[in-house]
Amino acid sequence: MLSNNMELDSFDMVICGDEIKCKWDNDKKELYRRALREMQQKRLMNNSHIKFLKNKCKISSKNFQCPLCKKTNIDHLEAAHIGKPIIITINKIIDKYIDELSFYELFLKVIEEEDKSLITIACKKCNKELEIK
C-alpha cells in the first residue's frame, strides 16, 4: 500500500521479463489446463448472446442485478455453468488427450463438451451455488 509521504519512481516499478517465474513454466499439463480454461472463459465472455443477457441485467455502469438472487450493486456478472464445473471437463480432456492432440484440437474437445452444458448468467455467489459439489 502506498503511504501518503511516499513518492513513486517509475524506475522502481520495472521488472525484467527473466525475473518472472511461474510454477507451471515447465509443466505442460498445467500450462494447457490454464490456457484452455482461459480460452474457454474468453469464448463465453465474447459471445454476443451472453453479452446481451448480461446487458439485460445492467442497472448502470458496473452495477448489475443478479437474475437469480436479485441482489443489486454487483460490479459484474458471470456466465455460470449449471452442474459440473467446466474445469473438471477440461482436466479430463487433458488427462486423456494431452499427448495425442494439438492444443487447437484439445480446445475443440472443450467446446464439444461445453455444447452439452447449460449456462446461465449469475453473480459470483450464485455461480458457485450452481455447481455440483
Image (spheres, helix red, strand yellow):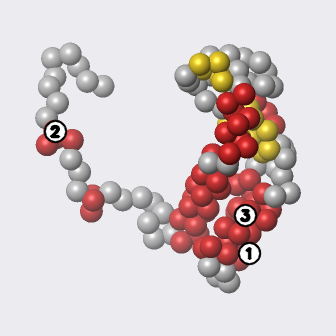
Q: Position of residue 100 (x, y in %)?
A: 68, 83
**Residue most extreme to the bottom:** 100
Q: Position of residue 96 (x, y in %)?
A: 74, 75
Q: Quadrant of residue 129?
A: top right
Q: Amino acid at mark 3?
A: Val
Q: Quadrant of residue 30?
A: bottom right
Question: Comparing marks 3 and 1, which lies closer to the viewer?
Answer: 3
Helix, strand or loop status at disc 3: helix
Res. 77 visible in picture: yes
Residue 71 in the image: above or below residue 103: above
Q: Which residue is mark 3?
A: 110
Q: Amino acid at mark 1?
A: Lys
Of the image marks 3 and 1, the number of the one nearer the N terminus: 1
The answer to which of 43 and 17 lies nearer the viewer is 43
Q: Which residue is mark 1?
A: 96
Helix, strand or loop status at disc 2: helix
